[in-house]
Amino acid sequence: MECDREKNLQNCNCTWEPCSRKGKCCECIRYHWSRKELPACLFPDDVEATYDRSLEKFIEIYGK
C-alpha cells in the first residue's frame, strides 16, 4: 500500500516541528503506540499543543 503523505498532511495537526513522521500515519501510530501514546490527530488542537498524548489524557477527554 502506498502512503499518500501530501493528502495525510492535510489532516495532520501535529505541532512537533522536528517530527519526521508527519503524514506517514503508519510510522506515526507505530511510534506513539510503542510509547503507550496516541498520535496528535486523535486529540483536539488545544490538547495536542500540550504534547500530552497519553492514553490517560485521551480517556479523560473522550471517556465522558
Image: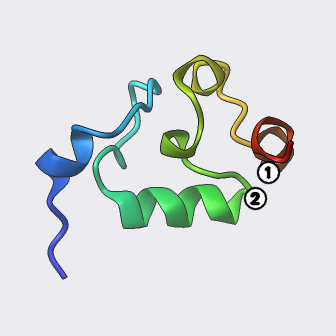
Helix, strand or loop at label 1? It is: helix
Q: Say whether marks 1 and 2 touch (CB < 8 Å).
A: yes
Asked if residue 63 lies left or right of residue 2, the reply is right
Which class describes the residues within 10 Å of circle 2: few (<14), some (14-19), or many (20+)?
few
Q: Amino acid at mark 1?
A: Leu
- Residue 4 circle label: none
**Percent of width and height locating residue 63:** 84, 47
Q: Measuring 70% from the left and 52% from the top, which residue is drawn there?
A: 37
In space, the residues marked 1 and 2 are separated at their CA atoms by: 7 Å
Helix, strand or loop at label 2? It is: loop
Quarter location, residue 64: top right
Asked if residue 61 lies left or right of residue 43, the reply is right
**Percent of width and height locating residue 60:** 86, 38
Q: Which residue is mark 1?
A: 55
63 shown above or below 15 = below
**Percent of width and height locating residue 14:** 44, 32
Q: Measuring 78% from the left and 36% from the top, which residue is drawn there?
A: 61
Asked if residue 54 lies left or right of residue 23, the reply is right
Q: Nearer the viewer, residue 19 or 8?
A: 8
**Percent of width and height locating residue 54:** 77, 44
Quarter location, residue 56: top right
Asked if residue 34 lies left or right of residue 15, the reply is right
Q: Amino acid at mark 2?
A: Lys
Q: Nearer the viewer, residue 58 or 16?
A: 58
Q: Which residue is mark 2?
A: 36
Q: Look at the image and tell me in which quarter the N terminus lies.
A: bottom left
Q: Earlier in the sequence, mark 1 or mark 2?
A: 2
